[in-house]
Amino acid sequence: MMNYPLLLRSILYRAYTVFPEQEIVSRDYSGMFRYTYRDMYGRVCRLANALADLGIRPGDRVGSFAWNHHRHLELYFAAPCSQRVLHTVNIRLFKEQLVYSINHAKDRALFVDEDLLPIIEQIAAQLPDVETYIIMTDKKTLPSTTLPNVHLYEELLAAAEPDYEFPEFDENTAAIVGYTSATTGDPKGVIYSHRGLYLHCLMMMTGQLSVDDRDITMPIVPMFHVNAWGRPFTDTWAGAKQVYPGARPTVADFCELFDREKVTYSVGVVTIWMGILQHLRANLGKYDFSHVRFLLSGGSALPASLTQAYEEEFGVTLYQGYGQTETTPVTFISVPKAGMVNLKGPERYRQRAKSGLLAPGLEMRLIDADGREVPHDGRAMGELLLKGPWIIDSYDRSAAKTEEAFLDGWFRTGDIATMDENGYLQIVDRTRDLIKSGGEWISSVDLENAIMGHPDVLEAAVIGISDIKWQERPLACVVLRPEARGKVTEADVKAYLADKVAKWWIPDEIVFVGEIPKTSVGKFSKKALRELHSAGQLA
Amino acid sequence: MMNYPLLLRSILYRAYTVFPEQEIVSRDYSGMFRYTYRDMYGRVCRLANALADLGIRPGDRVGSFAWNHHRHLELYFAAPCSQRVLHTVNIRLFKEQLVYSINHAKDRALFVDEDLLPIIEQIAAQLPDVETYIIMTDKKTLPSTTLPNVHLYEELLAAAEPDYEFPEFDENTAAIVGYTSATTGDPKGVIYSHRGLYLHCLMMMTGQLSVDDRDITMPIVPMFHVNAWGRPFTDTWAGAKQVYPGARPTVADFCELFDREKVTYSVGVVTIWMGILQHLRANLGKYDFSHVRFLLSGGSALPASLTQAYEEEFGVTLYQGYGQTETTPVTFISVPKAGMVNLKGPERYRQRAKSGLLAPGLEMRLIDADGREVPHDGRAMGELLLKGPWIIDSYDRSAAKTEEAFLDGWFRTGDIATMDENGYLQIVDRTRDLIKSGGEWISSVDLENAIMGHPDVLEAAVIGISDIKWQERPLACVVLRPEARGKVTEADVKAYLADKVAKWWIPDEIVFVGEIPKTSVGKFSKKALRELHSAGQLA
């Protein structure tokens, strides 16, 4: 067979050749921007030339500090396909982490959304490698800024040559670099190669998640978060119409876009689906979601109650994908097997709450503390190890972190899971979030899901608290629906749990809070909860 | 990312891990054989050990001379995944071509179906490299045979060790070798690498052709013909239930399997779909085809009239794939774009008759005789060139044939095509089958399709005949429905064509024949027709 490298340019090529008229919709500062794949291709060519005009060489890294929009999409293609590396900086990192990751990556240029300028202005003096800043906006003139060496994105493109021939190079070349959200220690750098992204995104076009040009997709998961789970590449490859929600979208914005653009498929983290559900309930009949084929949830476990609410109240199917920054990310997908499609009642939603089936192309192991494979019986817990073409083999520029994360060539996910007889993985907990009580393990995730099944509970997060007798005991932080506040008591929640979890799992303490702190990617921050508890601020 | 090779063992691994209970059904000599992916995996392990027991080393080639059944499926995995190479010998080749290809491939062992023994017995003396023959049958004892060194497949498996660890090796390693059906000259050998098959089959799981474990698939296209278009790998990867039609299947057998096993998806050449259509029409109400999601046709152009008949008479959707032995094979797929799904009337079927949209991962060019790219306007004809990870870069052990087939690193398909504004390829003809008349080109394929639109015509093939004035003129060989024979005249057919093709395209001569000779893979054999004409045997 031809020695034909697996490069992201193949994705761009097909979109331009086969689906030139397909539409891309992007929420810009002054309204909806619409163009076609043909237009996008033309601008990607100009952007590739503009990178050269800026003095960015092959192999150099350029950062993006941006929301989900068409300019970010152009960067997703122009940088990697011209052999530069795009660093998708997480706009929600703390300042020290931002400085750390941009300096660690050695970004030579930074593409910044206009409304995010204030954040970068505050840290620019600490970014010695960044030589130039490019501002992304639909305004015609440069906004006032303290940043040095500033360009307007649209002016750069207008000045660049229109024709560009995408080069051929080794498929193992770096395409994108991302950083873990780092609940402990410094963020860790992960390099996504062309080959890894290509194979991951081709996999994401297969089976029950398959997408084609009849689809209208909207990535809600941020493009600075693990390649937006590959959607910008996958959806372009499939020739789907794409909808980008732009800067600072609210749940109302998402609901309007679903309705107006007739979105068929969207991806986002669990907390987003919780927020959208509340908004839909509060605005019954306002939004048409009938064209949605399914929503894909990720980032943390999908509660059975959430799947049930979407399905029974709005006729919308919710699946989940499981993965990590280190795995591009998707490794398991929770689609039902043939015999499970028509399950009814609680069994249906228990099944839907599983983390999923192994994606085509990967290999897995579940091992106990002694490194022995545990049985696939749905009960035995083990750490999940993975191998495959879109799993990292090292952290960028960090031998020490790499050492910890691998075992005999397998990537250690740090997640504890079970595997049932049907091949469904169930993540039980993060290794560090498991609660060790009296020599047994309590899954904080299972406990949270049980609590979130209570009709008056909006959110729940469980952490382990030191205990002299039992070593650790669970503490639950619970957010109630506004109308239930002051009415539902700690005893009510414990009573609710009585027939749902083992007696010794029931938290000793349940604390009602106004909201649960979230990480930069929208997950419950157990680190923040533990800190609040240590400081005596969880009461 | 991990340096994780793309090997066919990944497909086997997922099927065994995720879908162990899924069923495989195979029509054996004494009835239907049923087992699970778990059983299949166990037998593949034994077969891999058995190959070693036979003295077959890594890199050695073993041949299969077999129909579509579960033992052939086991060979599809056991040989390549244990680093041997499977040569899928085309059972319909002429004897000289059989001898040529088995000797050219240097097969060290040959796996032969019981009912095909007589063919191999006749040529065994001319196969010096074949050291051992393995007979595939469900009988418990060796059939009587003149072959030397004979083993019974089932006995070999029973005697082999049950455990096998599939090795890791370079993804560019040869997995399968096949031969072109060679309408002219000796068959040419094509080597399919693990990487090429892996990527082709992953692509075949995407988009509108996507298949999953809810599907029940039946490959009608022979497993000795271009990897059965990848189905055995694709369907295993997807965890689909698979139905194999076994030895000497008739159209009635196919229809019964469709009905009884509730097949959702099948692939086969155009002539098969013609035969099945006749059988369905002759047995109205007998077979239930309601669970069929779609049928994929290939091998030659799909007439609009056939698609229309399936859709309007039986509610069955027919798509076509385009490809060649040299391209693994699928390179274009004729699924409708979003805006075309609801086309009505003749426009609908004209659209469906197009060869299709470029598959994700490939690159194409259409060039004229001077090597210039022709416009994509649906009219300009050019030779189709292809590049991609499942396109060959050479013929096996044949530098001279390789030389002719490539141009600047592109594979020359030898097919003349147009490309329309919507990205749909339309194969116009084989370079050698185009009829050059008065300095213009006539597409024999278009003319055939026009003639096959006549309600009384079952089959039509058109060849170019030397003509002193015009250089070449078309001659059409036509097979009428039995009840129309002797009634429909040459003048009727010409009159029918009058408003369907240009006047100068209308064949000077129309010959009614009982059947059109077919090639070893079921296509109309224009070579045989030309020979009959030269010999004065076409009336």
Image: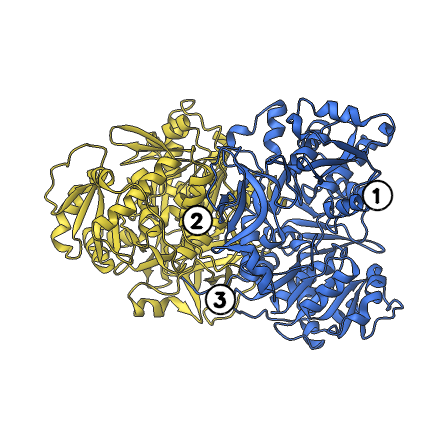
Chain colours: A yellow, B blue
From the top left corner, tell me how far across and down residue B182 is, in percent. Answer: 69, 55
SS at mark 2 in the image: helix
Which callout, 2 or 1, points to the residue nearer the camera? 1
From the top left corner, tell me how far across and down residue B384 is, in percent. Answer: 54, 45
Reply above or below: B277 against B523: above
Residue occupying the point 30% across, 70% down? A400
Residue B343 lies left or right of residue A146; in this view the side is right
Q: Quarter holding the C terminus of chain B?
A: top right
Can you name the residue that lies furthest to the right here? B144
From the image, tell me which residue sits under label 1: B537
Residue B498 lies left or right of residue A191; in this view the side is right
Task: Give the CA separation, mark 3 to mark 1.
Answer: 73 Å
**N-term mark: 2 or 3:** 2
From the image, tell me which residue sits under label 2: A10
Residue occupying the point 75% across, 62% down? B98
From the top left corner, tell me how far across and down residue B277 is, in percent. Answer: 76, 35
Can you name the residue that lies furthest to the front here? B468
